[in-house]
Image: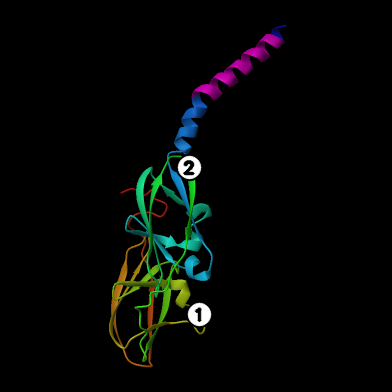
Amino acid sequence: MNHSRSRAFTCLLVLFASLVFSPLLRADNKVLGEVELVGASKVENTSGVWVDGQYVGYLNELKGSKKLLLLPGDHEITVRQGGYLDFTQKVVVRAGEKQSIEVKMEKDTSVVLPRVTAEIKLEVKPNRAAVFVDGVFIGHVAEFEGIGKALLVAPGKRNIKITLPGYHTFETDVDVMANQKTVVKTEMVAGGPAEGTPLNK
């Protein structure tokens, strides 16, 4: 009889604990909302993603430990790729909810590629970082690495900026000549807002 009473008392304690403490834990775990970006092709999946003006990475990597978790409220998501029109969508994020957005990039017909180009090889770590040429986003570092891959630009003086959350921005000017190769090499220095920091306006 005593054993039964003891067991019943233990069950009541467990039930009480689950009723009192679990909602607090669940609330804590569900403060943020998740936004999943879905791309149909390589163009979308290698495009850079900005949330409220802050670069967060390229589309295909924003999953798992890098999934896009945002504070509740209104946010603006912009997806960019060199030679394509920006894809912009406003979203309302709710705590504990997940929503998916299908991203479709459309070619920018106003972009004219230079007939004569210079080649810039990028050797940058981490290679997830976003690359800008003269203030225009053109892709992330990994797209321009390896044999047969390089950044093709018009000859002349070019400003190269490389940025990634959690690291100090790297910026340099290069003077490139037609049909010649220039190498930009750097290892980014940690600092700035940490990766995974919840975003809000």
Check the image and report above or below for 153 versus 25: below
On the picture, is 158 further left or further right than 95?
A: left
Q: Secondary structure at mark 1?
A: loop
Residue drawn at the location 71% of the way across and 11% of the way down: 4
Q: Is residue 9 left or right of residue 17?
A: right
Colouring convention used in this rendered image of the protein: rainbow
Assess whether residue 18 is covered by the magenta stretch: yes
For the image, the number of numbered tags is 2
Residue 196: % across, % down:
42, 52
**133 is within the stretch colored magenta:** no
Q: Which residue corresponds to mark 1? A: 146
Q: Tell me what residue is drawn at x 44 percent, y 82 percent.
A: 150
Q: Is residue 4 left or right of residue 66?
A: right
Whether residue 134 sits left or right of residue 183 in the image: it is left
> Which residue is most to the front?
109
Q: Which mark is residue 97?
A: 2
Provide residue 175's location: percent of width, then percent of height.
28, 86
Of pointers 1 and 2, the one earlier in the residue sequence? 2
- Where's residue 35, x and y in %? 46, 51
Amino acid type, mark 2? Glu
In-front residue for pair 29/2:
29
> Which residue, as the protein is rendered here, is positioned at the far right?
1
62 to 17, vertically: above or below: below
The span picked out in magenta is: 4-20
Amino acid residing under circle 1: Gly
The image shows residue 131, relative to residue 7, as above or below, that is below
